[in-house]
Image (tube, rainbow, N blue to C red):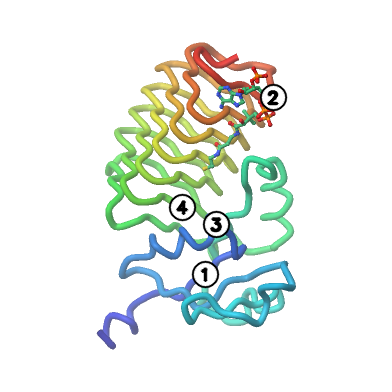
């Protein structure tokens, strides 16, 4: 056990939030979480199952620690780029965290600061940008492109050749038809069926999504 701990890479998770604590479950034997970073005074100085919660002054205080930055909810996802950029973490210090029970194909391209949760399947030639989170049991099929800063909820089906542009939020349980393109900064509501391109609508939902 000691040898395993020695080999694990150190990780701080930002923020102390629902997605942040779910990230903790994804670390497997590769990462050891040495702290959360929070902006919320009610949490700073406390701990979560023994893991300390710090303020931002503890970010990047040593050379060996990586950061996973996963802010954003259906209400705040449009601010993800601004929030992550303001942390000022060099790209090579941003982690890629893949749950040991996710299946990421060998020809998939995955950017930095990616969080891929349990049960996610990503198949041939899919391209996942930087700062992308994919929640449990989502499937992303061949040749699909998920651009930077996008969040994909749990149980989403992204069929082949789909493009989800920058900084979208795809609500849980949504299906996206093959070949569809979704414009940047779109929120797709929970449980939707997206069957044609979404060009200039900022929020769509339902079946078919409108
Ligand atoms: C789409 C969404 C943003 C709309 O939120 P809202 O603007 O507060 O809308 P309201 O709840 O006031 O609903 C407005 C109408 O749309 C309907 N509606 C809202 N969300 C819907 C959805 N996802 N699917 C179908 N209908 C929906 C409501 O029933 C309501 O219909 P009515 O006017 O006939 O009564 C929200 O419902 C949603 O799905 N957010 C994503 C949540 C999510 O993915 N959570 C998972 C976290 S991982």
- Residue of label 2: 202
Kind of element beneath mark 3:
helix
Q: CA distance from mark 3 to mark 2?
A: 24 Å
Q: Is residue 5 left or right of residue 130?
A: left
Local packing at callout 2 (Cα closer than 10 Å; few below 14, some 14-19, many 20+) is: few
Name the residue located 46 percent from the left edge and 27 percent from the top edge: 174
- Residue of label 3: 18
- Residue of label 1: 66
Q: Earlier in the sequence, mark 4 or mark 3?
A: 3
Kindly report which numbered mark, 1 or 3, lies closer to the viewer in this rendering. Answer: 3
Kind of element beneath mark 2:
loop
Q: CA distance from mark 4 to mark 3?
A: 13 Å
Query: Nearest the camera: 136 or 105?
Result: 136
- Residue of label 4: 115
Q: CA distance from mark 2 to mark 4?
A: 24 Å
Tally the numbered discs. Answer: 4
Q: Is residue 32 left or right of residue 36?
A: left
Q: Position of residue 31 (x, y in %)?
A: 39, 70
Kindly report which numbered mark, 4 or 1, lies closer to the viewer in this rendering. Answer: 4
Residue 38 falls in image quadrant: bottom right
Q: Earlier in the sequence, mark 2 or mark 4?
A: 4
Q: Which mark is residue 100?
A: none
Q: Are marks 4 and 1 in contact (CB under 8 Å)?
A: no
Q: Position of residue 11 (x, y in %)?
A: 49, 71
Residue 168 higher or lower than 70, as above or below: above
Q: Earlier in the sequence, mark 3 or mark 2?
A: 3
Residue 210 higher or lower than 87, as above or below: above
């Amino acid at each position: 056990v000691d040898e395993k701990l020695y080999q694990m890479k150190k990780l701080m998770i930002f923020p102390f939030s629902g997605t942040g604590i779910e990230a903790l479950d994804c670390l497997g034997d590769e990462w050891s979480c040495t702290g959360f970073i929070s902006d919320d005074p009610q949490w700073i100085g406390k701990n979560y199952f023994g893991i300390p919660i710090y303020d931002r002054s503890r970010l990047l205080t040593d050379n060996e620690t990586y950061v996973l930055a996963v802010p954003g909810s259906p209400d705040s996802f449009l601010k993800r780029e601004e929030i992550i950029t303001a942390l000022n973490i060099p790209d090579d210090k941003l982690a890629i965290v893949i749950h040991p029970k996710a299946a990421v194909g060998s020809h998939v391209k995955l950017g930095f600061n990616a969080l891929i949760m349990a049960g996610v399947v990503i198949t041939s030639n899919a391209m996942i940008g930087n700062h992308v989170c994919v929640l449990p049991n989502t499937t992303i099929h061949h040749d699909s492109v998920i651009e930077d800063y996008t969040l994909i909820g749990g149980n989403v089906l992204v069929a082949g050749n789909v493009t989800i542009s920058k900084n979208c939020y795809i609500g849980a349980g949504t299906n996206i038809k093959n070949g569809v393109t979704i414009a940047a900064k779109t929120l797709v509501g929970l449980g939707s069926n997206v069957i044609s391109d979404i060009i200039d609508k900022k929020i769509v939902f339902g079946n078919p999504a409108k």
